[in-house]
């Protein structure tokens, strides 16, 4: 039977209806079968005759998207430790210079007035190596302080928080002709693979009209269900699916269903085999580090996936913030450092750029519970050899506030636009619906 891991809305239900109408039951579907159904039903175009790739699309560059979920406190992540206002408004939770990583220019775009949280030793090392870019004061007009709405805004790159995910729109525009009066063809011969998210649910950022992402928490849960049956059933299924193209026209419903079953089986085996390989470096023993280790293993295995998503949560620090925030930001930093070392050991570091965001920052002043409440602007991080290390944009003023909140100095869509234009080989205006000035964070 088919186990639907996600619950897509009507815009993503085409193939689900096709299954119901076909009267064919597949005992072979993976737990995340909607992703493979979508990728088979509206597949990527074939390379042109004699070519091994799709013209105009750089299939070698990989983007990692990381969300610090809950609203990371940017002011205790990148600390304006010389600013008296910071210490006055945060008398209990403010951090002083004695236990911070003070960031000098060191040949990078730096500032002697800013420092990293003392728990961020790994990211400090990347900063010193020129492989950490910090974009300051990132936000958007008329900020929303709801976790859900603001997350949707970041995921869709639309300040209404509606529509498809911006990576989903990118894949649609680049590969399926969405927005160009074209459509994919269900011939199962795509070059791009669905984006992969580590987690219980597929995030909106990766979801488009034509392709659902693959999502899983653990490789042990991501398996072809047919493997639980008797060997004669497994052998019969393999013979059936492997001969699909020989016995059915490419446009037949049966061929579509058989290819979907075959895709699910093969992708399940590919991902589990990739993740089973021992990493080349030692990762910390945290849940987030495990996510990054799995992504590193999939990249090392040579999978064609171009976008991966991971997250680390519990940044909603309304009370007793200091210990919790220091622990979480330290876990984030240590895992990122291990991941970059892993990529370098693989020889894949120049192929990968990692981008990190949170749905909003925190208010400037602490609250009565020694925590911080929902705010607005916060720093973004980008990692890898292809970023311009150091600081970008301006740090927001701590005195010129918007009702107690920081005023953003960089629109997050400017970062997205540069990633799309310079790293992903797309036209950002086609994806974002408008043009946004680059901040020159990428060094390519």
Image (cartoon, helix red, strand yellow):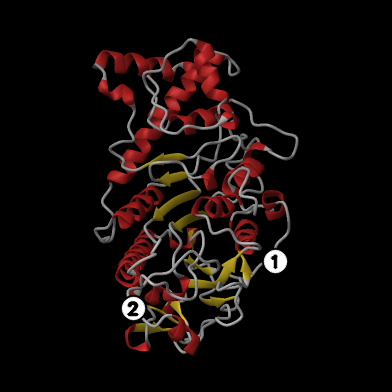
Q: What is the spatial separation of the Cα atoms under label 1 and label 2, in whole angstroms?
A: 33 Å
Q: Quadrant of the C terminus?
A: bottom right
Residues at badges 1 and 2 in contact (C-beta under 8 Å)? Answer: no
Image position, residue 198 (x, y; %): 39, 46
Q: What element carries label 2?
A: loop
Front-most of 220 and 366? 366
Front-most of 7 and 16? 7
In this picture, residue 207 sits left or right of residue 324? right
Q: Mark 1 points at which residue?
A: 437
Tell me, for residue 245, which label it has, or none.
Answer: none
Depth check, mark 1 against mark 2: the one in front is 2
Front-most of 301 and 178? 178
Q: Name which quarter of the figure residue 103 lies in.
A: bottom left
Image position, residue 133 (x, y; %): 51, 72
Q: Dot 2, how many residues are within 10 Å of its Cα: few (below 14), some (14-19), or many (20+)? A: some
Q: In which quarter of the image is the N terminus?
A: top left
User: Does residue 214 appear in this view?
Assistant: yes
Tell me, for residue 118, which label it has, or none.
Answer: 2
The residue shown at (38%, 42%) is 200
First along the sequence among labels 1 and 2: 2
The residue shown at (55%, 66%) is 376
Farthest front residue in view: 368
Farthest right residue in view: 181
Q: Dot 1, how many residues are within 10 Å of its Cα: few (below 14), some (14-19), or many (20+)? A: few
Q: Name which quarter of the figure residue 251 lies in.
A: top right
The residue shown at (49%, 40%) is 213
């Amino acid at each position: 039977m088919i186990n639907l891991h996600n619950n897509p809305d009507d815009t993503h239900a085409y193939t689900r209806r096709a299954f119901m109408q076909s009267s064919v039951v597949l005992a072979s579907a993976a737990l995340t079968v909607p992703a493979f159904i979508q990728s088979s039903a509206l597949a990527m175009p074939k390379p042109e005759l004699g070519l091994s790739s799709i013209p105009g699309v750089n299939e070698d560059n990989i983007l990692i998207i990381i969300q610090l979920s809950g609203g990371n406190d940017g002011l205790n992540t990148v600390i304006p430790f010389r600013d008296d206002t910071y210490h006055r408004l945060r008398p209990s939770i403010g951090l002083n210079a004695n236990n911070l990583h003070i960031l000098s220019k060191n040949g990078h775009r730096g500032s002697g007035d800013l420092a990293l949280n003392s728990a961020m030793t790994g990211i400090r090392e990347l900063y010193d190596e020129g492989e950490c870019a910090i974009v300051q004061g990132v936000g958007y007009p008329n900020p929303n302080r709801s976790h859900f709405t603001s997350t949707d805004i970041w995921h869709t790159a639309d300040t209404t928080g509606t529509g498809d995910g911006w990576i989903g729109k990118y894949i649609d525009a680049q590969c399926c002709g969405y927005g160009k009066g074209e459509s994919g063809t269900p011939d199962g011969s795509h070059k791009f693979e669905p984006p992969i998210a580590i987690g219980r649910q597929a995030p909106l950022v990766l979801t488009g009209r034509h392709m659902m992402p693959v999502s899983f928490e653990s490789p042990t849960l991501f398996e072809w269900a047919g493997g639980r049956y008797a060997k004669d059933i497994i052998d019969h299924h393999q013979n059936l699916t492997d001969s699909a193209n020989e016995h059915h026209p490419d446009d037949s419903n049966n061929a579509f269903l058989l290819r979907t079953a075959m895709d699910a089986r093969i992708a399940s085996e590919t991902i589990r085999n990739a993740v089973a390989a021992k990493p080349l470096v030692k990762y910390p023993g945290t849940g987030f580090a495990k996510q990054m280790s799995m992504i590193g293993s999939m990249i090392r295995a040579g999978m064609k996936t171009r976008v991966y998503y991971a997250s680390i949560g519990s940044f909603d620090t309304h009370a007793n913030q200091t210990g919790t925030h220091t622990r979480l930001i330290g876990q984030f930093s240590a895992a990122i450092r291990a991941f970059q070392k892993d990529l370098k050991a693989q020889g894949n570091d120049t192929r990968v750029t990692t981008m990190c965001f949170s749905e909003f920052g925190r208010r400037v002043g602490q609250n009565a519970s020694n925590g911080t409440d929902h705010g607005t602007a916060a720093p973004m991080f980008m990692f890898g050899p292809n970023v311009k290390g150091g600081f970008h944009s301006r740090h927001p003023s701590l005195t010129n506030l918007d009702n107690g909140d920081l005023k953003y100095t960089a629109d997050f869509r400017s970062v997205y636009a540069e990633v799309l234009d310079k790293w992903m080989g797309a036209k950002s205006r086609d994806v974002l619906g408008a043009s946004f000035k680059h901040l020159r964070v990428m060094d390519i």
